[in-house]
Image: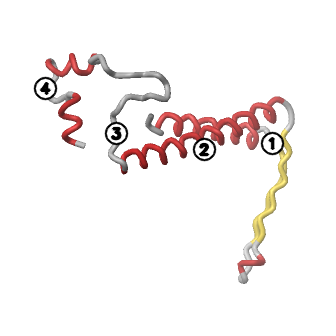
Amino acid sequence: MKADRPLIGAVLLLATGLSLVFIYGTGTSGFNIAFPFSGSTLHLDLTTSGLAVLGGVACTALGALLLVWAFLVAIVCQIGMLLGRDRYADDRYFGRHSSEPDDSDRNSERNPLSITGEQRHTLF
C-alpha cells in the first residue's frame, strides 16, 4: 500500500476540521516580539460553538489518525524497499491481488508510450 491516498485524506480532513473551528469561532489574538526571544508571546483566545465544534473536532481527530496511519504505512513501505520487497507488489493488507492482467496492460498495444508490467520492474 502506498501512503499517498491516506496522506491526501488526512490533509483534507485536517484542513476541514481546523477551518470549521477557526471560521465559526470568535475571539482575539495577540503576538508580541521581544529581543530576548524568551520574552516573545503568542496569545490566542478562541471560542467556537454549535455544530462547528462537533464537526471540526471530529474531522481534526480523524485527520490526525489518518496522518499517523499514512506515516506508519510510509515507514513500512520504505523498510520493505530496503529489504528488497518490490514496490509494485500485491497489496496484501486489503486483499487486492494483481494476478490477472489489468486494463492498462491490454491498452499498451494501442499506446506505444505506455509502460507494461515487465518494463516497469526493469525501470525502477
Task: Say which amino acid is labelled 4.
Answer: Pro
Secondary element under disc 1, as helix, strand or loop, is strand
Tell me the number on the disc at residue 46.
Answer: none
Q: Name the image quarter holding residue 77.
A: top left
Asked if the residue under mark 2 is in contact with the one under mark 1, i.e. CB atoms within 8 Å, the reply is: no
Q: Name the image quarter holding residue 56.
A: top right
Disc 2 and disc 4: Cα gap in Å?
A: 40 Å
Write the residue at 54% across / 46% down.
71
Write the residue at 53% across / 40% down.
7
Say which of marks 3 and 2 sits in front: 3
Disc 1 and disc 4: Cα gap in Å?
A: 55 Å
Disc 4 and disc 3: Cα gap in Å?
A: 24 Å
Residue 55 in the image, given as x and y percentages of width and height = 75, 31
Disc 1 and disc 2: Cα gap in Å?
A: 27 Å
Residue 9 in the image, given as x and y percentages of width and height = 56, 34
Residue at which label 2 appears: 68
**For the C terminus, which image quadrant?**
top left
Q: In the visual, does 15 lie left or right of 51?
A: left
Say which of marks 1 and 4 sits in front: 4
Task: Say which amino acid is labelled 1.
Answer: Gly
Give whichever of 30, 124 is nearer the camera. Answer: 124
Asked if the residue under mark 1 is in contact with the one under mark 3, i.e. CB atoms within 8 Å, the reply is: no
Asked if the residue under mark 3 is in contact with the one under mark 4, i.e. CB atoms within 8 Å, the reply is: no
Task: Tell me which numbered mark, 1 or 2, is placed earlier along the sequence.
Answer: 1
Task: Tell me which numbered mark, 3 or 1, is placed earlier along the sequence.
Answer: 1
Task: Tell me which numbered mark, 2 or 4, is placed earlier along the sequence.
Answer: 2
Task: Tell me which numbered mark, 4 or 3, is placed earlier along the sequence.
Answer: 3
Residue at which label 1 appears: 25
Residue at which label 3 appears: 87
Please, is residue 40 above or below residue 73 in the view? Answer: below
Say which of marks 4 and 3 sits in front: 3
